[in-house]
């Protein structure tokens, strides 16, 4: 881990991040979660990596001129997993659902599909904003809910710049807890507008902090993405994350079951 207990400054593509004692603290958190608990997380990790890879392959095909079309059986299966299924290996959809009828309408709407194809081809903050706008316009067109969580879940399938914590309120709970505990220092809000930008900032910070572990293959981008959710699970319970780290022990001493990880 590229830091010490006292203070370190990490260069981020979203600004200059001052990571104080937080590097050491994040290291201890990571050791207890994706580190010691990899056997619990492997199923989710493998599904996550598999579908992310599938989306990347589709992005490459789209860049060669392929037209993603719901009338094609394989494409329809891909689109269902990306947009519709309850759990797609990235995250569960929770209460943010797309009806079967609206799935059919959305995937046959050319403006919607254009914004989706562009985002899958070249995921970025700009293309995400265009896709989110395209989703919202389509929802208004058909009188449907805007499904912000599903929009974010698509993003998490397309890029490792964002985490699997696709519920904005849950992500913010971790994000601002880390800031409030002075584990990370945030740039002005104007520099991180919205869920996607905040994710870029936090994931870049985590990758900088755990650069040595990434290089040594002791962790990977997928586990670091899952790590954000693991922090949420602990921040959201009645005890503080610091206390939970101290109390964390062998199986049977309060570990979260692997099945619960999927309902994020």
Image (spheres, rainbow, N blue to C red):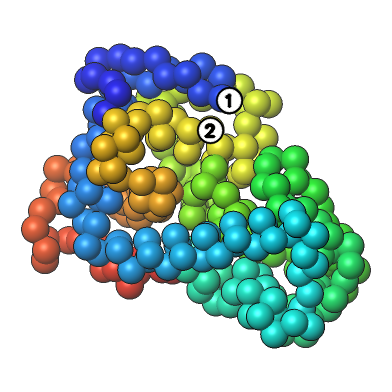
> Residue at point 76% right, 78% down?
70
Q: Position of residue 227 (x, y in %)?
A: 36, 48
| Labelled pair 2, 1 in contact (Cβ < 8 Å) | yes
Mark 1 lies on a secondary structure that is: loop
Look at the picture and state if 168 lies above or below 190.
below
Q: Position of residue 173 (x, y in %)?
A: 47, 45
Mark 2 lies on a secondary structure that is: helix
Mark 2 vs 1, N-terminal side:
1
Q: Answer few, some or many: residues within 10 Å of disc 2's Cα (few below 14, many 20 plus, some between 14 and 19).
A: many
Quadrant containing the C terminus is bottom left
Residue carrying label 1: 14
> Residue at point 66% right, 56% down?
60
Q: Answer few, some or many: residues within 10 Å of disc 1's Cα (few below 14, many 20 plus, some between 14 and 19).
A: some
Q: Is residue 59 left or right of residue 91?
A: right
Residue carrying label 2: 201
Relative to the observer, which residue lies in front, 113 or 103?
A: 113
> Residue at point 36% right, 50% down?
223
């Amino acid at each position: 881990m590229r830091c010490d207990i006292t203070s370190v400054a990490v260069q981020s593509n979203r600004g200059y991040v001052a990571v104080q004692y937080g590097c050491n603290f994040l290291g201890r958190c990571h050791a207890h979660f994706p580190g010691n608990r990899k056997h619990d997380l492997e199923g989710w990790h493998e599904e996550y990596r598999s579908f992310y890879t599938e989306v990347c392959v589709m992005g490459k095909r789209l860049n060669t001129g392929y037209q993603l079309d719901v009338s094609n059986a394989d494409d329809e299966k891909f689109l269902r997993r990306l947009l519709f299924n309850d759990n797609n290996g990235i995250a569960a959809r929770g209460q943010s659902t797309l009806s079967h009828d609206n799935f059919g309408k959305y995937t046959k709407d050319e403006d919607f599909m254009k914004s989706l194809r562009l985002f899958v081809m070249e995921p970025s903050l700009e293309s995400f904003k265009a896709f989110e706008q395209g989703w919202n316009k389509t929802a208004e067109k058909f009188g449907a809910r805007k499904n912000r969580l599903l929009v974010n879940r698509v993003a998490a399938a397309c890029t490792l710049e964002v985490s699997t914590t696709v519920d904005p309120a849950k992500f913010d709970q971790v994000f601002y807890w880390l800031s409030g505990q002075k584990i990370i220092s945030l740039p002005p809000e104007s520099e991180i507008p919205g869920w996607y930008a905040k994710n870029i900032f936090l994931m870049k910070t985590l990758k900088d902090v755990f650069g040595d572990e990434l290089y040594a293959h002791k962790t990977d981008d997928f586990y670091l993405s899952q790590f954000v959710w693991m922090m949420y699970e602990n921040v959201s319970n009645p005890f503080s994350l610091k206390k939970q780290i101290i109390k964390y022990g062998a199986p049977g001493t309060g570990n979260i079951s692997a099945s619960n990880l999927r309902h994020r």
